[in-house]
Image (cartoon, rainbow, N blue to C red):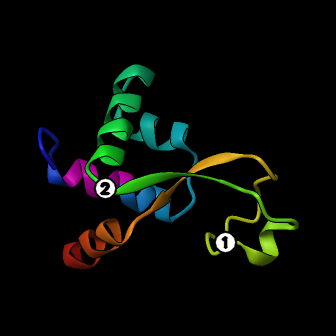
Amino acid sequence: MIGLKRDIVIKIIKGIAEHRSLDEIRIKLGFSKTVFQSILDQLVSEGYIEMVECKVSPMCRACASGCFSRKIGVKMYGLTDKALDTLDNAS
């Protein structure tokens, strides 16, 4: 979490885990789109989240994310084991 406050990282990870939209998370935390994208990029580089693309049909039956609203080819962020460990330790 180099350069990022732990509570911000946890709020973003938790929002992704709850399948909230990135705009909803960004607005709730009060970040501009540019700053928020930089934070997401940093979380990817530090191994907390990863970019995934739905390639399954029908996705909702096979996807472990359980979002039930994405379409094939949609790119989204998924949590890594590191993020899940961070959430477990935050509780």
Q: Which residue is mark 2?
A: 47
Q: In the figure, 26 relative to 66: above or below?
A: above
Between circles 1 and 2, the one closer to the viewer is: 2
9 in the magenta segment: yes
Question: What's drawn in magenta, residue-wise?
Answer: 7-12
Left or right? Give the position of 88 relative to 14: left
Mark 2 or mark 1, which is nearer the start of the sequence?
2
Relative horizontal placement of residue 24, taking residue 32 as reference (left or right): right
Closer to us: 87 or 82: 82
Residue type for callout 1: Gly
Residue name at image x 70 percent, y 72 percent: 63
Residue 67 versus residue 4 in the image, above or below: below
Residue 49 placement, left or right of 86: right
19 magenta-colored: no
State whether residue 51 is above or below residue 27: below
Vertical placement of residue 7 versus 62, above or below: above
Q: What amino acid does circle 2 point to?
A: Gly
**For mark 1, what is the residue?**
66
In the image shown, does 71 or 15 lie closer to the viewer? Answer: 71
Q: Main secondary structure of the magenta part?
A: helix
Question: Residue at horizontal 87%, vertical 65%?
Answer: 57
Residue 22 coordinates in the image, percent (x, y): 52, 42
* Residue pictured at 76% horizontal, 65% vertical: 68
Q: Position of residue 42 (x, y in %)?
A: 29, 39
